[in-house]
Amino acid sequence: MTEHTVTLNRKARHEYSIEETVEAGIALTGTEIKSVREGKVNLNDAYARIEHGEAWLIGAHIAPYAGGNRFNHDTRRSRKLLLHRGEIDELVGMTTRKGLTLVPLRLYISAKGLAKIELGVARGKQQHDRRREIAARDARREMERELADVERGR
């Protein structure tokens, strides 16, 4: 069995430049993991924060489980991230530098069946950086199109 990506945070790669990635587990309740396995998760506007020596995922939306009852979970509650002490200390060191933040990039189910989240240590992009990235992508696509046309013309 391989890992299965449940959701991606496409907005994160557009708004931030990712400097490093870290894998973390998530402490979920029973109805939350069932909803995650159904793919009813949204990571837009979510971020991670380290408070009192613990890492937390804040703002992630996990929809209520359809088969749940009155004990269903709160959709936007803060969820604890499972990291080793050394990893947390390293992240604290990186995020205290100016302009770095922890952004969730993707949520997936590991080969062992556990919910994992990939966090990115990120720096916010300025508007001109985004424009430059879009221009470079367009230029690369145009070159690929011209190369394909040249190859077809042979």
Image (cartoon, rainbow, N blue to C red):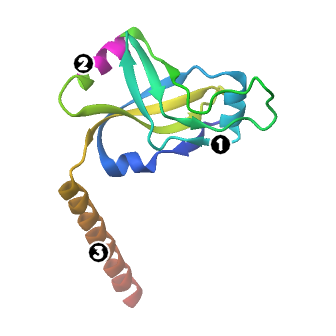
Q: Amino acid at mark 2?
A: Gly
How many neighbours does mark 2 have within 10 angstroms: few (below 14), some (14-19), or many (20 or more)?
Answer: few
At a point 43% along the width and 12% down the height, the residue shown is 84
Which quadrant of the structure image shows residue 61?
Answer: top right
Circle 1 SS class: loop
Q: Label 1: how many residues lie within 10 Å, few (<14), some (14-19) or many (20+)?
A: some
Residue position marked by numbered label 1 in the rendering: 40
For the residues labelled 3 and 1, the Cα–Cα distance comes to 38 Å
Task: Assess whether mark 1 and mark 2 are in contact (beta carbons under 8 angstroms).
Answer: no
Residue to which mark 3 is pinned: 143
Numbered label attached to residue 93: 2
Residue nearest the viewer, comparing 84 with 3: 84
Q: Nearer the viewer, residue 129 or 3?
A: 129
Q: Residue at (46%, 45%) from the top-left corner?
A: 9
Q: Position of residue 43 (x, y in %)?
A: 50, 40
Report the magenta residues as a range: 86-93
Q: Amino acid at mark 3?
A: Met
Q: CA distance from mark 2 to mark 3?
A: 41 Å
Front disc: 2 or 1: 1
Mark 2: secondary structure: helix
In the depicted structure, whether residue 108 falls above or below residue 114? below
